[in-house]
C-alpha cells in the first residue's frame, strides 16, 4: 500500500494550531504555578501536628494521586454543574490540572522539608528567627533546591497531561488537532505534527529548567543565612 504524505492542510490550519499551542502553554504555566502553591500547603498539612489539617491534606493527596486525571476533569466539568457550579472548559481544565499537580508536588515538597537537618531549625531558633522567617529563608529555599529535579520533571508531566483536557473541550493543541483531522482526514500527518510539537515543547522546557536550575541552585542563598550568621 502506497501512502503519500500530504501537508497541504497545514497552511490554513496554522492559526488554529497557534491558538491551541498558546492555550497549552497557558494551562501548563497556570497549573504548575498554582499547583506548586497548593503543594506547599499540602506538604505542610501532611507534616502538621494538627490532626484535622493533616487528615485533610492526606485525604486530598491520596484521592488525587490514586484516581485518573481524566476522571478528575470529568468530575469538575460535567459533575459540578449538578451542584449549580458551571465552569468554562478552559477554567475547568486549569482547575483539574492545578489540583492534580498540587497533590504530586505536595509529596515532592514534603520529601524536601523532611530532608532539612534538625540543626538548621535549632540554629534559626538560636538566632531568634520567627517560624515564618525560618520557613521562608531557611527551610523553603533548601527544600526547593533538593527537590528541584523532581519538581521540574513533574512540570513536564503536567505539560504532556494537558492534552487530556481536550476531552472536556478545552481548546488546547490536542483539541485543535482533533478538529483539523476531522476536516482534513489526514490523521497520520496531523498527529505526527502534534507529536513533534509536544516533543519540541518538552525538550525546550527541560532545557529551560536546566538553565534555571544551573543559575539559581548554584547561587542559592538558601541555607547560608543561618551558617553566615552563626559563623564566629
Image: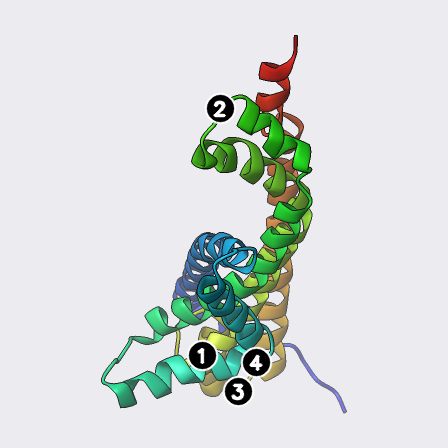
Where is the N terminus found, in terms of image quarters? bottom right
**Disc 1 to disc 3, C-alpha distance:** 28 Å
Residue 7 at least partly seen: no
Q: Which residue is mark 2?
A: 128
**Disc 1 to disc 4, C-alpha distance:** 9 Å
- What residue lies at 63% left-to-right and 64% top-to-bottom? 196
Q: Which residue is mark 1?
A: 73
Q: Which residue is mark 4?
A: 68
**Disc 4 to disc 2, C-alpha distance:** 46 Å
Q: Disc 2 or 3, which lies upstream in sequence?
A: 2
Q: Position of residue 86 (x, y in %)?
A: 26, 80
The answer to whether the residue labelled 4 contacts the one labelled 2, judged by CB atoms less than 8 Å apart, is no
Q: Position of residue 222 (x, y in %)?
A: 58, 29
The vertical placement of 41 against 116, above or below, is below
Toward the left, the furthest residue is 84
Where is the C terminus found, in terms of image quarters? top right
Amino acid at each position: 500500500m502506497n501512502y503519500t504524505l500530504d501537508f497541504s492542510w497545514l497552511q490554513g490550519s496554522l492559526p488554529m494550531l497557534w491558538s491551541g499551542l498558546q492555550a497549552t502553554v497557558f494551562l501548563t504555566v497556570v497549573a504548575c504555578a498554582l499547583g506548586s502553591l497548593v503543594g506547599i500547603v499540602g506538604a505542610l498539612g501532611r507534616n502538621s501536628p494538627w490532626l484535622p489539617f493533616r487528615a485533610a491534606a492526606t485525604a486530598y493527596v491520596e484521592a488525587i494521586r490514586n484516581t485518573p486525571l481524566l476522571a478528575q476533569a470529568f468530575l469538575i466539568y460535567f459533575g459540578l454543574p449538578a451542584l449549580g457550579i458551571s465552569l468554562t472548559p478552559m477554567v475547568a481544565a486549569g482547575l483539574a490540572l492545578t489540583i492534580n499537580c498540587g497533590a504530586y508536588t505536595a509529596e515532592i515538597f514534603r520529601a524536601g522539608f523532611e530532608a532539612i537537618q534538625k540543626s538548621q531549625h535549632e540554629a534559626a531558633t538560636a538566632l531568634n528567627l520567627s517560624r515564618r522567617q525560618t520557613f521562608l529563608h531557611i527551610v523553603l529555599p533548601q527544600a526547593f533546591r533538593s527537590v528541584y529535579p523532581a519538581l521540574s520533571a513533574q512540570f513536564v508531566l503536567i505539560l504532556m497531561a494537558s492534552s487530556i483536557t481536550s476531552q472536556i473541550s478545552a481548546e488546547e493543541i490536542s483539541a485543535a488537532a482533533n478538529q483539523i483531522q476531522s476536516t482534513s482526514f489526514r490523521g497520520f500527518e496531523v498527529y505526527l505534527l502534534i507529536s513533534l510539537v509536544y516533543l519540541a515543547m518538552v525538550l525546550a522546557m527541560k532545557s529551560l529548567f536546566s538553565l534555571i536550575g544551573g543559575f539559581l541552585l548554584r547561587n542559592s542563598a538558601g541555607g547560608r543565612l543561618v551558617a553566615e550568621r552563626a559563623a564566629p
